[in-house]
Amino acid sequence: MGNKKSYGTQNDLNLKLVIALSRATTGLHRGASRNMKENGLTPSQFEVLEVLYHKGAMKVCEIKEKILASSGNMTVILANLEKDGYIGRIMCETDRRSFILDITEKGKEVMDRAFPLHIAYLEDTLKNLDESEKREIIRLLKKMQGLGGNDEGK
């Protein structure tokens, strides 16, 4: 015990940062997942419905881009949402080989219940951070990803 191995100051700091980020995101996802399950949704299903709920109808490739999902997993998610009556398909006018997905009334009803719970959960979970701290975290995370960081997370 007490025989802590060091990989150098910067590497040790990098490892601590990754662990802290991982613990924070894992905790956020775990809590958010509980709210989604209360409404019969998986996190991935919630993400798809959330995009359609707020952005409107779109092609599968656009949804995948918005939620950063893999195509194999997306097929199952969409099939289950359609089977449950939460989304519907509309044939694309310009490309008969593809279709557009839209949220149904049933899907809107579940999001009318689930999304306010999600917002309340985030508000409670992130209440110890003030507005400037949240903006700074967003900026730093974007900088870490090489995305600049001047945008405010939109």
Image (spheres, rainbow, N blue to C red):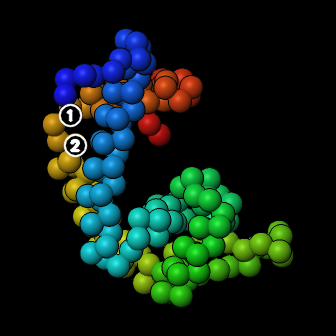
Q: Quadrant of residue 11?
A: top left
Amino acid identity at mark 1: Leu
Residue 133, by quadrant, is: top left
Is residue 123 visible from the viewing direction of this image? yes
73 to the left or right of 23? right
**Label 2: which residue?**
126
Residue 16 as seen in the image, left or right of residue 45: left
Q: Is residue 18 left or right of residue 83?
A: left
Residue 93 placed where, x, y %?
79, 73
Q: Which mark is residue 129?
A: 1
Q: Residues within 10 Å of mark 2 (few under 14, many from 20)?
A: few
| Residue at disc 2, secondary structure | loop
Residue drawn where x is 22% and y is 56% of the image:
121
In which quadrant is the N terminus drawn? top left
Tag 2: residue type?
Answer: Leu
Q: CA distance from mark 1 to mark 2?
A: 6 Å
Residue 118 image point, x, y percent: 29, 60
Side of 125 relative to 99 (left or right) = left
Q: Are marks 1 and 2 in contact (CB under 8 Å)?
A: yes
Q: Is residue 108 above or below residue 8?
A: below
